[in-house]
Image (cartoon, rainbow, N blue to C red):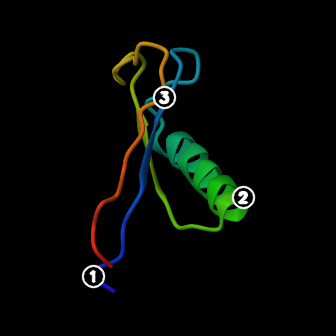
Amino acid sequence: MHNLDSLEIQVEVSEKMFSDEIKFLERIERRIKEEVESTLGIVVEVKLVEPNTIARSEGKAQRVIDRRRL
């Protein structure tokens, strides 16, 4: 099972939602994780990050092409 791909979703938390209360943030992470997994049917890791920490794209989708040989 060490050859499985992994997916991490980083979610910026707004200033309004940002809290120093760890249990509150953990509940948000868990809820997002459960929603994504039940919708997409894949296992993901969710990481909440501070506001304005994720680099902004220039409005274009970033595509990834997997060229590994299976």
Q: Where residue 38 sits in the image (x, y, percent)? A: 71, 63
Q: Callout 2: few (<14), some (14-19), or many (20+) C-alpha neighbours within 10 Å? A: few
Q: Where residue 32 sits in the image (x, y, percent)? A: 62, 48
For the point 51% across and 41% down, the residue is 25
SS class, disc 3: loop
What amino acid type should be assigned to the residue bearing mark 3? Ala
| Labels 3 and 2 touching (C-beta < 8 A) | no
Going from N to C along the chain, the mark reached first, 3 or 1, is: 1
Question: Which quadrant does the N terminus fall into?
Answer: bottom left
Q: Callout 3: few (<14), some (14-19), or many (20+) C-alpha neighbours within 10 Å? A: few
Between 16 and 62, the residue placed more toward the observer is: 62
Numbered mark located on residue 61 in the image:
3
Between 21 and 55, the residue placed more toward the observer is: 55
Between 67 and 57, the residue placed more toward the observer is: 67
SS class, disc 1: loop
Residue under numbered circle 1: 2
Give the spatial CA distance, label 3 vs label 2.
21 Å
Q: Where residue 49 sits in the image (x, y, percent)? A: 39, 32
SS class, disc 2: helix
For the point 29% across and 79% down, the residue is 3
For the point 28% across and 74% down, the residue is 69
Residue under numbered circle 2: 39
Question: Measured along the vertical axis of the image, is residue 29 above or below residue 53?
Answer: below
Give the spatial CA distance, label 3 vs label 1.
29 Å
What amino acid type should be assigned to the residue bearing mark 1? His
| Labels 3 and 1 touching (C-beta < 8 A) | no
Give the spatial CA distance, label 1 vs label 2.
24 Å
**Viewer-side label of 3, 2:** 3
> Exactly how many numbered labels are in the figure?
3
Question: Measured along the vertical axis of the image, is residue 42 above or below residue 24?
Answer: below
